[in-house]
Amino acid sequence: MFEPSKYKFRKAFKGRLQGNSMVGNTVAFGSVALKASECCRMNGRQIESARKTINRFLKRRGKLWIRIFPNVPVTKKPTDVRMGKGKGSVEFWIFRIKPGRVLFELEGIPRSQARIALEKAATKLPIKCKIVINNYGGIRH
């Protein structure tokens, strides 16, 4: 599971997802990428599920970059607990995704194979995604 090893504050505010992504919105490392089209709060399990799907399809060929990491804690109070008495304990970690954010990048495999792998990964994610091709570098097929 993805979880930060060190963090400054134990608990955080929920935050809002407004506007488009200003950082991480270009293909920087690979030649084919998966880009978010909607807002969402994606947790570590969803990211790990998509990563496993890509790796199973590629069979250790090519290179995969994961451009997101869950760094925001989400707290929950147990069921049947009355109001008050402070904030609950940290249950899981999320990453706030805005439209235009690049999630995964692939390099070193044919584009047709990369497209299939990213489409399979997109089915594991809770948002609509699109596949973006970087025309500078990588294997061209």
Image (cartoon, grey):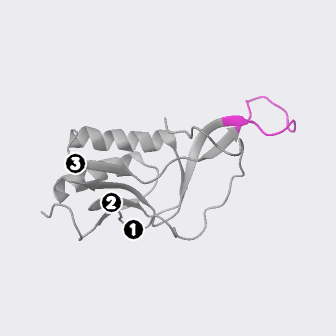
Which tag, 3 or 2, sits closer to the chain's start?
2
Q: Residue at x 55, y 51 (%)?
A: 95
In space, the residues marked 3 and 1 are separated at their CA atoms by 20 Å
Residue toward you, 98 or 38: 98
> Which SS class for mark 1?
loop
For discs 2 and 1, the disc positioned in front in the rendered view = 2
Q: Residue at x 35, y 65 (%)?
A: 27
Q: Residue 132 lies in magenta, yes or no?
A: no
Q: Residue at x 71, y 41 (%)?
A: 10
**Mark identifier at residue 29:** 2
Left or right side of 136 for 89: right
Q: Is residue 42 above or below residue 36?
A: above
State the extent of the magenta-drawn residues as a range: 76-90
- Residue identified by numbered label 3: 62
Inspect the image, locate mark 3, and give the three-letter code of the amino acid beneath it.
Answer: Gly
- Residue identified by numbered label 1: 26
Location of residue 80 (image quadrant): top right
Left or right side of 32 for 98: right
Inspect the image, locate mark 2, and give the three-letter code of the amino acid beneath it.
Answer: Phe
Mark 3 is surrounded, within 10 Å at the Cα level, by few (under 14), some (14 to 19) or many (20 or more) other residues, namely some
Mark 2 is surrounded, within 10 Å at the Cα level, by few (under 14), some (14 to 19) or many (20 or more) other residues, namely some
Location of residue 28 (image quadrant): bottom left
| Rendering coords of residue 7 (x, y %) | 64, 43
